[in-house]
Image (tube, rainbow, N blue to C red):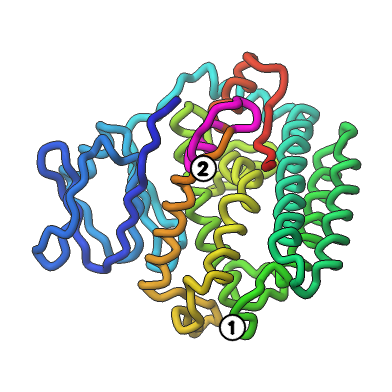
Amino acid sequence: MKHHLNTLFVTTQGAYLSCEGEAILVRVEQETRLRLPIHMLGGVVCFGRISCSPAMMGLCCERGVTISYMTEHGKFLARVEGPVSGNVLLRRAQYRYAEDCEKSANLARTIVTAKIANCRTALLRSVRDHSDAAGRDKIRLAAEQLAQALDRLRAALPLDTVRGIEGDSAREYFQVFDHLIVAQKEDFFFRSRTRRPPLDNVNSLLSFVYTLLTHDARSALETVGLDPAVGCLHRDRPGRPGLALDLVEEFRPVLADRLVLSLINKRQVQANGFRKSETGAILMDDETRKTVLTAYQERKQETITHPFLGEETTMGMLVYLQARLLSRFLRGDMDAYPPFIWR
């Protein structure tokens, strides 16, 4: 079991990151606000106008700590990392697998099956937790539609058919997503999934947490030696981490959607923490972003028993464990890839 490492999120504009011995220092206006031993970190994510000293960047590269740069509002810009981990034989096996249309379709079908199963579980849990909420009948109907999609995925299917089922299931799921919001309905409503840019408060939250999850998935894949750019469900596109997006699909309902719903329903985020930009995009302010980041880190510290391994682990380790299982499968050590299916 890999030791659970934390991610340092830096959001204070104008902050400067440096190092002193084996520690990372965060300075704001010449004052040291935070000091963390490098061995406690798995990654550093900088939002907006954050500066890093060359020495600090070198230390992170030597210790395998990836530095990611985002815009102030969560759009990925760049990464700084040391030598690529893993071995060439594993990556060659990955590339050969991705080039085989039938094999790619089978792995994509496995991933989509897990995603739909987890979406269905999320819907049924919502009905159980809020049995008196409006729309529960529509939620149950959507869960039945997802169950039918899972039946269709039992057979071997071409990749385009798998994608079609995934798209139809996503629409069914998001058509009832608004019914999962049981508080602050006037300010947090959901009509449809909007990206680039998000056009309402809920989509702003979803996009931001999906970005964090993709960052973790990409880091996990690189840690085990896989190329995060070469996926099966998400095919090659310049600048797109296809395999990381594949891995994320299993965890959207579990780590992202449930977190966003919890933040809204428990009133941990408020409408005054969002604003509309000139382009129509809905953006979070600093305090709301910090609230989301804190909740995300806390969620990752929660414990769960892995359904395949039977071991107790943290939610934050799930992405790494799935990346490890995926690498074993592509290497030929396992007959099939066991996706994460939420119970």
Horizontal placement of 38 versus 148: left or right? left
Q: Using the image as rendered, state which of residue 139 and residue 80 is in the foreground.
A: 139
Q: Using the image as rendered, state which of residue 229 and residue 26 is in the foreground.
A: 26
Horizontal placement of 292 versus 286: left or right? right
Q: Which quarter of the rendered picture does the N terminus lie within?
A: top left
Q: Helix, strand, or loop for circle 2?
A: helix
Query: Circle 2 is placed at which residue position?
Result: 315
Alpha carbon of mark 1 to alpha carbon of mark 2: how far? 29 Å
Instruction: Inspect the image, locate mark 1, and give the three-letter code of the amino acid beneath it.
Output: Asp
Q: Which quarter of the rendered picture does the C terminus lie within?
A: top right
Is residue 310 placed above or below 331 in the rendered structure?
A: below
Q: Specify whether residue 309 is painted magenta.
A: yes
Task: Tell me if I can see residue 204 in this picture.
Answer: no
Task: Tell me if I can see residue 90 in this picture.
Answer: yes
Horizontal placement of 223 versus 37: left or right? right
Q: Using the image as rendered, state which of residue 95 and residue 201 is in the foreground.
A: 201
Q: Position of residue 223 (x, y in %)?
A: 44, 31
Q: Which residues are magenta?
A: 306-321
Quadrant of the image occupied by residue 325: top right
Q: Position of residue 178 (x, y in %)?
A: 71, 72
**Residue shown at the point (26%, 61%) measured from the top left:** 50
Q: Which mark is residue 310?
A: none
**Residue shown at the point (71%, 17%) measured from the top left:** 335
Q: Specify whether residue 150 is painted magenta.
A: no
Query: Circle 1 is placed at which residue position?
Result: 187
Horizontal placement of 90 versus 298: left or right? right
Instruction: Inspect the image, locate mark 2, and give the three-letter code of the amino acid beneath it.
Output: Met
Q: Position of residue 288 (x, y in %)?
A: 42, 72
The disc, 1 or 2, on the residue closer to the chain's N-terminal end is 1
